[in-house]
Image (spheres, rainbow, N blue to C red):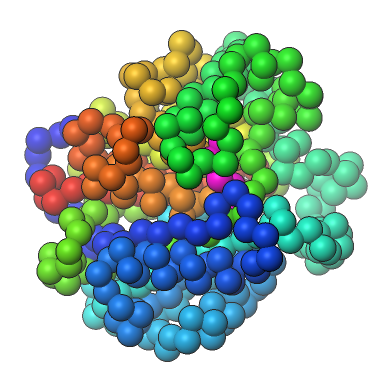
Amino acid sequence: MSTKKKAGTGCAIVGVGTAGCGEAQGFSDVEILALAAHNAVLDSGLQFKDIDGIATANVNSPMWALNVVEYLNIKPKFVESTNIGGSSFIAHLQPILHALASGQCNAVLVCYGSTQRTQTIGRREKLKAKQLIDPYPYESPYQPLVPITPYALMAARHMHQFGTTRRHLAEVAVAARRWAQLNPEAFRRDPLDIDEVLAAKMIADPFTVHDCCLVTDGAGAFVITRNDLAKDLSKAPVHVLSNATAVWHRQVSSMADFTITPAVESGSRAFQEAGLKPSDVDVVQLYDAFSINPILFLEDLGFCKKGEGGPFVENGGIAPGGHLAVNTNGGGLSCVHPNMYGTFEVIEAVRQLRDEAGARQVKDAKIALIHGNGGVSGASQSTALLGVSEVL
């Protein structure tokens, strides 16, 4: 961790909460969202009457924020519902920071909920309807298995270009499971080894089933406010040191290079704004929709050189006891992945920085990096750095 004091953004996360992670039989998206929101507000020491800003998104509803505001019975002065995929909830930070700094609002609730695992009625119909109104013109005619096929192409290119192996991919999945085994909230906690990953059913070459994220229910929420208000609350604030978002493309066929994502830009800007470098980071939360994602992001964010992500994760490099603590809750591969995962990265980072992570706690964690990934081909990337009060 860097010993140089950081200016930060003047805002801090003061409460986090989850609900319905894994399976939430009988609940709707907004119902488990409300439970997570309640838990986050309770954790913050605030009350719902103090919440005057809302940030939320849902892939199934273009006006989702209206549903949430009505269900929670709040009247926010600030509303943010931009949807750029799974990175949305980290990208939401930027407009939130501006709204808080300007005095437009005082306390913003960021929230998400999905029951995609148990609410199966109409899933195929929704997918077909979405493909009609939101097609991928250069790819849809070939009927790819979205989003698996695009990421499989990225993985295959990385393997061809840099010598990355299926075993390297398996290391990512096994590391996630080892962290999940330390997390009572994780959905998959059964043992998993490299050979089991490699021998599992192939889904889209080079991915087996264990290289692909979970399909779960789950809701996550967090509350963010200005530092002047955060200092008077019961729990230690986790300060937002920086945030940056980059979007370069939509479809994998439009990528200039399958091995380079917009994380190169979002990460660089986030580190520069915070006055930090990768070696200052104690704990890392990366959006691991597939096992190639952490390898790509570790490279693009500067934790290792391009092409060296495979060797970086070898021999439990990102597992408990490794040289970098990555996805300490078990990530989307083993903890929870209800379609959009970003809120859970924030929640885990906050718990680590508060020293509330139990058996998976990273010792002396002071600075965390969270990185969101959105779209079906790493299209949107958002990076944020968080820190404890000591680093300000």
The quarter holding residue 83 reads: bottom right
Q: Residue at 55% x, 32% y: name it.
A: 189
Check if residue 337 falls in the magenta segment.
Answer: yes
Q: Position of residue 72 (x, y in %)?
A: 48, 81
Residue 255 lies in quadrant: top right
Q: Main secondary structure of the magenta part?
A: loop
Is residue 136 found left or right of 303 in the rendered image? right
Q: Nearer the viewer, residue 221 or 99?
A: 221
* Along the viewing direction, whichever of 148 and 336 lies nearer the viewer: 336
235 sits left or right of 221 in the view: left
Is 86 placed above or below 39 here?
above
Is residue 97 among what the camera can see?
A: no
- Marks counted in the figure total 0
> Where is residue 263 drawn, in percent x and y?
47, 41
Q: Quick check: is 243 in the magenta stretch?
A: no
Relative to 142, does residue 197 appear above or below in the rendering? above
Instruction: Specify whether residue 48 is in view.
Output: yes
In this picture, residue 308 sits left or right of residue 187: left
The front one of 110 and 195 is 195
Answer with the quarter of the image where residue 355 lies. Answer: top left
- What residue span does the magenta drawing correspond to? 334-338
Query: In the image, 352: left or right of 142?
Result: left
In front here: 57 or 104?
Answer: 57
The residue under the point 72% across, 25% down is: 208
Instruction: Report the residue at 62% width, 77% height from top.
Output: 63
Estimate the x, y position of residue 23 in percent, counting from the top left: 63, 52
Residue at image coords 72%, 43%: 147
Task: For the N terminus, give its image quadrant.
Answer: top left
Measuring from the top left, give residue 264's x and y in whole percent. 44, 38
